[in-house]
Amino acid sequence: MPILIVWGGLEYFYKTVESNYSYKHQIIRTGYDDIETLILGDSHAFFGINPEYLDTKALNLSNVSQSLYFDQLLFEKHADSLPNLQNVIITIGYYSLSQLENTKEDVWRKYFYRSQMELDVPIISPFDLKKYSLSMTRRFDKSVSLISKYLEKGTIIGCDANGWGTYYKNTSGVLLEIESKATAERHKDFLLNFEENMARLQSMIAHCKKVNCNVYLVDMPVYEGYLELLEANKLEKITKSCNDLAINKNVTYINLRQDPRLETSDLYDPDHLNHKGAKKYTKIINTIISDPKNDD
C-alpha cells in the first residue's frame, strides 16, 4: 500500500505539473499562426539563443540534451502547421552529428517527449511499461529533488514565454580551465559516423526548401581551453559536413565556434552562454538572418 501511494503521488505530479516539455508544447500549439522562426537544438540553443533579440517572431523549441533525433520529430510534427515559417535555426555542437539515438541522454527524456509533447517516439517499445507511467522513468531521488524544487519555487519550468532557458544568468562558479577538462572528457564519444544525423538534417532542409524557408546551422561559441581538448579531426569533419549542407541555397552555416568576439564574461561554463552572452550572440545571429550577405 505505501508503494502504491508513493507511485500514485509521483504519477499525479508528473501528469499535472507543467514542465519545459508540456509548456513548450502548449506555446507552439497556440502560436502556429505567429511563429516565423523556429529554434531547435540542445542546451546550447536553449540557453544561448534568446528569441527576444530576433527581428522575427520566434519560438525556442530546444531543450537540454535534445538530439537531432528529437529535433526532427518535433519539426515533422509541427512544420505543416506553421504557415508563416521563414527560418529554422538548428544548433550543431561537438557531439550533435555523432549522437546515437536511444543512448544515455534519452534514457528518461524520450518518455516526456512522448507524453508531454505528444510525439510518436519509435525508439520506445510498445511493451515498455515506462511508456505508460512517467513516475517509473526517473530514479526516486531525482523525482524527490524535482518535487522539492516545485514546492520551493512553485514551478519546474525553466524557460520564458519564448522558450528560452532562463537560469544560466552569470557563471557556474567553477573556473573555466578546470571545468573544461571534465566537460571535454564527458563529450568525447570517439564516433565519426554522421550518416544518420546528416540524413535527419537533409530531411528537414528538403521540407524547408519546399515551403521557401531558410535553415541556419549554428555552431555556437565555446571557451578556447575547452575547444583545444577536443578531437581536431572530428571538429574538421563537423565543419566540412555543415559546409556540405550549406551547398543547398536555403542553408547557411554560421560557425561561431572560435568567434573572436567571445569574452569569458559571456560564458556560463565552457560550452554554454549566460544571459549576457545569449543576448550578444542572438543579436549576431539576427544580423546574419536579417541580411544574408552579412555572414561574418
Image (cartoon, rainbow, N blue to C red):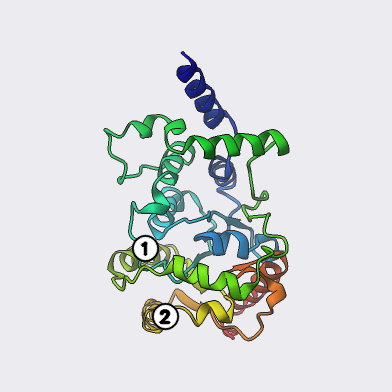
**Could you tell me residue 107's position as x and y percent?**
39, 47
Residue shown at 55% from the left, 48% from the top: 32
Q: Which residue position holds label 1?
A: 99
Q: Amino acid at mark 1?
A: Gln
Disc 2 element: helix
Q: Which residue is mark 2?
A: 235
Q: Amino acid at mark 2?
A: Leu
Local secondary structure at mark 1: loop
Give the percent coordinates (x, y) of residue 117.
48, 41
First in residue order: circle 2 vs circle 1: 1
Q: Are marks 2 and 1 in contact (CB under 8 Å)?
A: no
Between 136 and 123, which is closer to the camera in this rendering? 136
Residue 139 disc label: none
The residue at 46%/13% (across/down) is 1
Apparent side of residue 170 relative to residue 79 in the rendered image (left or right): right
Q: Which residue ends up furthest to the front in the rendered image?
A: 178
Q: Residue, x 43% and y 62% (percent of image)?
A: 211
Q: From this viewpoint, is residue 37 visible?
A: no
Image position of 126 with respect to 105: above or below: above
Question: Is residue 230 visible in this depiction of the protein?
Answer: yes
* Image coordinates for residue 202, horizontal then vertical, percent: 34, 67
Q: Nearer the viewer, residue 14 or 31?
A: 14
